[in-house]
Image (tube, rainbow, N blue to C red):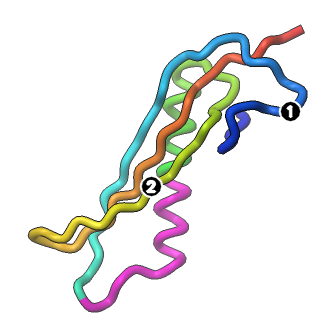
Amino acid sequence: MIVTTTSSIPNEEIKSILSVVHNSVLLEVGLFNGISSDKLTKTTNDVIERLTKKALELNADALIDLKIDYCYLSQPNIELVVTAIGTAVLLKTE
């Protein structure tokens, strides 16, 4: 599966758009210890992997326009929400 942040894929033609797919992961962050870059990288990769799985369940050939967002929530605990959204598409085959 091709996963890209762009809206097109070089040398490929999009046949049809299947669906917008999205996924979020909530990560608890300690008040004083923050979050390590390794943990953030792993969480981001997990979100992308889950999003890709959703696209594959739709029989998509590619996931385009991938966007990732990070948002802190601070009540009652400090938590980080990592959200990914993209468009599952079919590619034109020859």
Q: Please say if the residues under marks 1 and 2 sit with CB atoms less than 8 Å apart.
A: no
Q: Is residue 56 left or right of residue 61?
A: left
Q: Mark number for residue 32?
A: none
Task: Tell me where residue 5 appears, x and y as whole percent.
Answer: 66, 44
In magenta, the rendered stretch is 32-46
**Labels in figure, total:** 2
- Write the residue at 65% across / 12% down: 16
Q: Main secondary structure of the magenta part?
A: helix
Which residue, given by chain and number where applicable, does mark 1 sit on?
A: 10
C-alpha separation, residue under disc 1 versus residue under disc 2: 25 Å
> Does the magenta run of residues contain 28?
no
- Write the residue at 69% across / 40% down: 6
Task: Tell me where residue 42 appears, x and y as whole percent.
Answer: 52, 65
- Lower sequence index among marks 1 and 2: 1
Question: For numbered disc 2, what is the local secondary structure?
Answer: strand
Task: Name, please, the residue furthest toward the bottom.
Answer: 32
Task: Tell me where residue 31 appears, x and y as whole percent.
Answer: 23, 85
Which amino acid type is shown beneath numbered disc 1?
Pro
As displayed, is residue 58 above or below residue 85?
Answer: above
Q: Nearer the viewer, residue 58 or 32?
A: 32
Q: Quadrant of residue 27?
A: bottom left
- Write the residue at 53% across / 76% down: 38
Which amino acid type is shown beneath numbered disc 2?
Asp
Q: Nearer the viewer, residue 28 or 75?
A: 75
Crowding at label 1, few (<14), some or many (≥20) Cα neighbours within 10 Å?
few
Task: Name, please, the residue furthest toward the top.
Answer: 94
Which residue, given by chain and number where applicable, does mark 2 sit on?
A: 69
- Write the residue at 18% across / 71% down: 74
As displayed, is residue 66 above or below residue 91?
Answer: below
> Does the magenta run of residues contain 33?
yes
